[in-house]
């Protein structure tokens, strides 16, 4: 009988396998629209550059303009882009309540402006334009109060409830021994501790972080194990839960540019013009080949008729 860790590893692997064809499509779209993040089905190597067979950067630039425009209109750092209100509108006329709400807004804006929100926010809009789905994770931070992380779509699995709302998430992380020890302490396990103690910071270990709604919990208690959502950190290699906690709400903000019925993932802006993106890239390649043939056409030279090669450089002299 499988334990709790094995159960959630199985769910993650199953959901990951079910969307294999979708990941292949995401990879192709990211390749032409967001090449620096085109590692959905490929492995990233430090120092990788933009693919050399992309001949037209129109889709890359348009996606960047889309993301900049979305942030400017939706959540620009220069403007107040949200306000706090009450469902009972009759209370909104009382001065003390309005003052409290405005003071709360100022505190929230100070927290957001002091965090990394705007750096991660623009990454989310880039993902919406190219892939169609963005997952922004919020967590508490000792230095900045709150911290945001626009998760790479290849590492996160989203599941919906019966109403189509995201209520489960699985994220796979890869930590070095130093990173794992810094996050979990002595509970990381013997193998990680051995690597950490001997200074091996290159070997990496995989962990699965999952959040899901608790079916049974005591609402009268306020401890982490009696919160509406359970969180688990699982060691993939040993298939053991190394940390269990909880959250009061679902901290993953899942954005879909266009919703696909029955799927937790969305359609992107690029889906509407993806054939044109690929055609434009092929047309630009053809134009380059045509220009090269016009400038440096193939030449017909008699075999073994000359003792030295021709000089094809500009203003070259052939005697």
Image: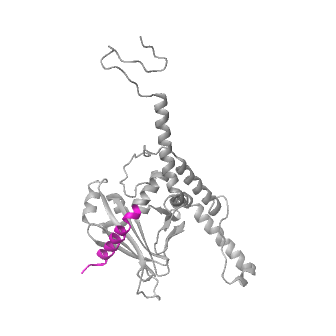
- Eyeballing the image, is 297 above or below 260? above
- Eyeballing the image, is 35 above or below 125? above
Q: Main secondary structure of the magenta part?
A: helix
- Between 299 and 10, the residue placed more toward the observer is 299
Q: Where is residue 166 in the image (x, y as percent from the top left)?
A: 48, 75
In this image, 285 relative to 202: left or right? right
Number of numbered discs? 0
On whether residue 56 falls in the magenta region, the answer is: no
* Point 63% across, 63% down: residue: 74
Q: Give the colour scheme of this rendering.
A: one colour
Specify the farthest residue to the top: 319
Q: Which image quarter: residue 208?
A: bottom left
Q: In this orientation, does residue 231 appear?
A: yes
- Between 184 and 312, the residue placed more toward the observer is 312
* Point 54% across, 66% down: residue: 257
Q: In this orientation, does residue 115 appear?
A: no
- Between 298 and 219, the residue placed more toward the observer is 298
Q: Where is residue 169 in the image (x, y as percent from the top left)?
A: 42, 72
- Between 131 and 234, the residue placed more toward the observer is 131
- Eyeballing the image, is 189 above or below 221? above
Q: Position of residue 80 (x, y in %)?
A: 67, 64
Assign the N terminus to one quadrant of the image.
bottom left
Assign the C terminus to one quadrant of the image.
top left
* Point 38% across, 69% down: residue: 209
Which span is picked out in magenta? 1-23
* Point 29% across, 58% down: residue: 196
């Amino acid at each position: 009988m499988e334990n709790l860790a094995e159960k959630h590893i199985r769910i993650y692997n199953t959901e990951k396998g079910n969307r294999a064809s979708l990941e292949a499509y995401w990879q192709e779209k990211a390749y032409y629209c967001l090449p620096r993040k085109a590692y959905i089905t490929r492995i990233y190597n430090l120092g990788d550059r933009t693919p050399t067979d992309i001949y037209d950067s129109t889709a890359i630039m348009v996606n960047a303009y889309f993301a900049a425009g979305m942030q400017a209109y939706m959540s620009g750092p220069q403007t107040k882009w949200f306000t706090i209100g009450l469902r009972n509108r009759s209370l909104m006329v009382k001065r003390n309540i309005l003052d409290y709400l405005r003071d709360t807004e100022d505190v929230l804006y100070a927290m957001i402006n002091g965090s990394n929100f705007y750096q991660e926010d623009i990454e989310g809009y880039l993902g919406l334009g190219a892939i169609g789905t963005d997952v922004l994770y919020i967590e508490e931070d000792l230095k900045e109060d709150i911290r945001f992380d626009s998760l790479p779509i290849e590492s996160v699995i989203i599941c919906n409830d019966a109403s189509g709302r995201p209520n489960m998430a699985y994220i796979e992380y890869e930590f070095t021994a130093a990173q794992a020890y810094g996050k979990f302490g002595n509970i990381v396990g013997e193998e990680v501790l051995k690597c950490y103690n001997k200074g091996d910071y290159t070997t990496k270990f995989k962990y699965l972080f999952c959040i899901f709604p608790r079916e049974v919990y005591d609402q009268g208690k306020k401890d982490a194990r009696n919160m509406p959502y359970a969180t688990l950190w699982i060691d993939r290699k040993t298939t053991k839960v190394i940390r269990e906690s909880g959250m009061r709400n679902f901290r993953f903000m899942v954005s879909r540019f266009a919703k696909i019925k029955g799927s937790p993932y969305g359609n992107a802006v690029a889906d509407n013009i993806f054939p044109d993106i690929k055609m434009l890239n092929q047309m630009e390649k053809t134009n380059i080949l045509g220009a090269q043939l016009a400038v440096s056409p193939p030449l017909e030279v008699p075999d073994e008729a000359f003792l030295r090669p021709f000089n094809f450089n500009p203003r070259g002299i052939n005697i």
